[in-house]
Amino acid sequence: MKTILKSLFFPFLAMLLMAAAPPWKSKQMEQWSEQDAKLILTNSPWVKKMTPALMPPLNEDQRRQGGQMGGGEGIGMEAFTPATLTGVGASAAAGKRGRRPTHIATVEVRWESARPVRAAEEKAHEEDPPALADGNYVVAIYDVPGVDVNQTALPFQLKKDAFLKVEGKKDRRASRVDLLPQEGGLATIVFMFPRSEEITPEDQRITFLAHLGRLSVAQYFYTAEMTMQGKLEL
Amino acid sequence: MRTSLCTKGRTVLIAGLLAGLASQVGLQTAKAQQAAASASQTDSSDAVTATSPMAAPTPDAPPDPQAAATPAAPQATPPPTTPPPVDLDTPFAFGDFTWMLSNPRNHDEVLDGKYFSGEFRVDTNYIYDYQHPIDHTLDETTEGERTGEFVIQALGVGGDFHAGNMQGRILTQFGAVSTAVPRNDASYSNGQWDLADAYRYLTEMYAGYHINYKHGLNFQVGNFLSFIGLFSYYSFDNWMYQPSYVSSNTPWFFVGMRAQFFPTNKLKFEPWLINGWQSYAKYNGREGVGGQILWRPTEDTDFVWNTYALGRDTLGNDNRSRYHADWSQEWKYYKNPTKLLKMITMTATEDFGCETGGTAVSGQAVVCTHGGVNGRPPAQNFAGIMAYNRWWIGERFAFEVGGGVLDNPGRYLALLPPINGANATSGTPYFTENPGQQLRAYDFQVGFDYFPSQWVTWHVEFTQRGSQQAIFNGPGGMTPPGGNNGLPQYYTCNDGTSAGTNVLSKGLCGGDGGVWYPDMVKQERRWIFALMVKL
């Protein structure tokens, strides 16, 4: 009896593990369902949702240094508390710099050049995925607010402040940036980084950094997770 | 039981005190960090942590292999407000430069409105001078005039007017600076109408027009601040209260016109056409020209190049021209918003200048270099450097060190000691500023700041200055017996009366107790306590 139970238990356990494992680990690409594809495009080692850091407001001196005046919003009487002068008291936090968080929308950072992502985009019938360029790692930020995609100078400026960082290797600066419109006034910003020096599984962590004006996007990716059938997919 | 309760009470008290201290220095407890983490709305745990909006995200989040495979739990985040534009158009808006020396560190404005952005500044100090001058006078600086007493150093009220493309700015300067700064400018003495009196209570006053060309083009006319020597005229904006000579002895303001052109959002060109070197009026027959190039390639670096040329800034000498170059670099070389030590920042400034020309007959001719060689007139030039470093500790504290040196043969940038009430127009026979005379000096400061809020700074500073020439006020002071006699350009006798001459001769003041001398020393050590407010 024990032997029968044992013989049933291990296959059952294996099946359970298979079911819990994400599709990019448990299935071949051809076997992915549309639901699998959507999972990959929303929550996988190649796709991260994050909230960009928003820089604190410019004070009037900074605006004046930039040749402009006004445009800010005074906080008025809120500043006039004993805590402002002493730092002691319940309302002391009111005086902390940049204490007013501005809530901004979540964006999606997608490692676009990875094969699983391209396959998932096709399977999920996504329209007009960003174009890839041979010899480049491609990372895209989706759902970016406030971008005029017709600004011709903007990609040139954005690429100067976008990097892929790998510990022990030279920072990789973006060589090209594309702007793609999305519905609802949002935009997709596509960054291309030369594969001049290949990223390998030994490079445990990749940091993607981009400054979009006063928005700052910084996201980690882990090579140990970005594998399919044991092969690093970037 | 009683003992254990007491012990427990003490423990609670100590824990409370430590917690309070920790909160003051910006330390976060695990709970606070948890709360901050949930407030940061980071949906993926391997997004790079950004605990403070003041700093760009820093790659320090621990790896979490489960994060990718596990869907993030829905969080109760506030609804997004209007999305901020990706602003790569506004100059210098791509970064947060409030860490810089000469920039105020506040992020929030108190008095900002649609057409007027109000500004209110107060700067008060108490200076303890180890020399204990009997007349409480401090000299060779514009950032402190009295010692051993409370001083309202500066009080400014005003702000920026802005309507459409029109711009205007006005800021008053009441307090000690309204005397200490205008007295270093002798230009008003050329001709009539006392501009020093007319302008002394206004530190900035200009109007301008903004044109939307490239990243901005402004034309402004009036009295505007000079950033030659890096430090801001307003102590609140600086890391140290006592700037080094390179800053203190170079202009705080210019009167004239300037353009500001921003070809990119990281670069500014600013040419000037001005009356002269920190002068309300024009000393002689020619204006000065100059300009500033400001470049901030990243949020962590700043380069500024200031140049001044052609101005003829010596009272009564229409042929002597002044030239000056001022370069500054600022660098944020360490940042980690999650640590107690949040930033380390530094600055370096290098200044070079000279004067050339003048009438040889009267002995007032000078040359920039190689003075005295083959019968050339004396060299009259200026070389100075200064450097500062600040450690930003938590949200509320900072510690800084710095200092500098100067070499100024001809003393043309020395701040004339106010002996017997002397100023730049009167001069004084006790400290002359003539071609060939030397001035070499050094200074260093150690400072500590407490920032109870973004609009207030409590500052303590030790400063030491030294000079090869006796230029600082000693215990006996620089005020004649009985007070100033109204004739600072002459020697004074020991009974307080004027000798009526600036030529020292045997027997001078023979009937008046001999010639009186100010008590000037070569070294000065001070403690500065200051409270500065900027709203």
Image (cartoon, coloured by chain):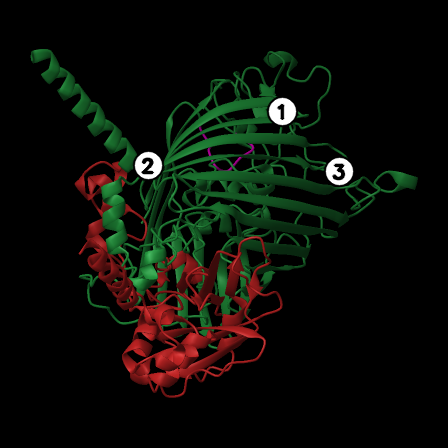
Chain colours: A red, B green
Tell me where residue B88 appears, x and y as whole percent: 45, 70
Q: Nearer the viewer, residue B284 or B279?
A: B279
Q: Tag 2's secondary structure?
A: loop
Residue A217: which quarter of the image?
bottom left
Query: What residue is at 26 percent from the left and 72 percent from the top?
Result: B82
Query: What residue is at 59 percent from the left and 56 percent from the top?
Result: A169
Q: Earlier in the sequence, mark 2 or mark 3?
A: 2
Task: Find the magenta span and give its range.
Answer: B139-146
Label 1 chain ID: B
Asked if labels 2 and 3 share a chain, the reply is yes
Vertical order, B34 against B1 (above or below): below
Q: Nearer the viewer, residue B514 or B413?
A: B413
In space, the residues marked 3 and 1 are separated at their CA atoms by 21 Å
Query: What residue is at 54 percent from the left and 19 percent from the top?
Result: B496
Q: Tag 3's secondary structure?
A: loop
Q: Tag 1's secondary structure?
A: loop
Label 3 chain ID: B
Label 2 close to label 3 by CB (< 8 Å): no
Vertical order, B213 against B321 (above or below): below
Query: What residue is at 56 percent from the left and 30 percent from the top?
Result: B444
Magenta span includes A24: no
Q: Which mark is residue B27?
A: none
Q: Amino acid at mark 3?
A: Pro
Q: Which residue is mark 1?
A: B491
In space, the residues marked 2 and 3 are separated at their CA atoms by 52 Å
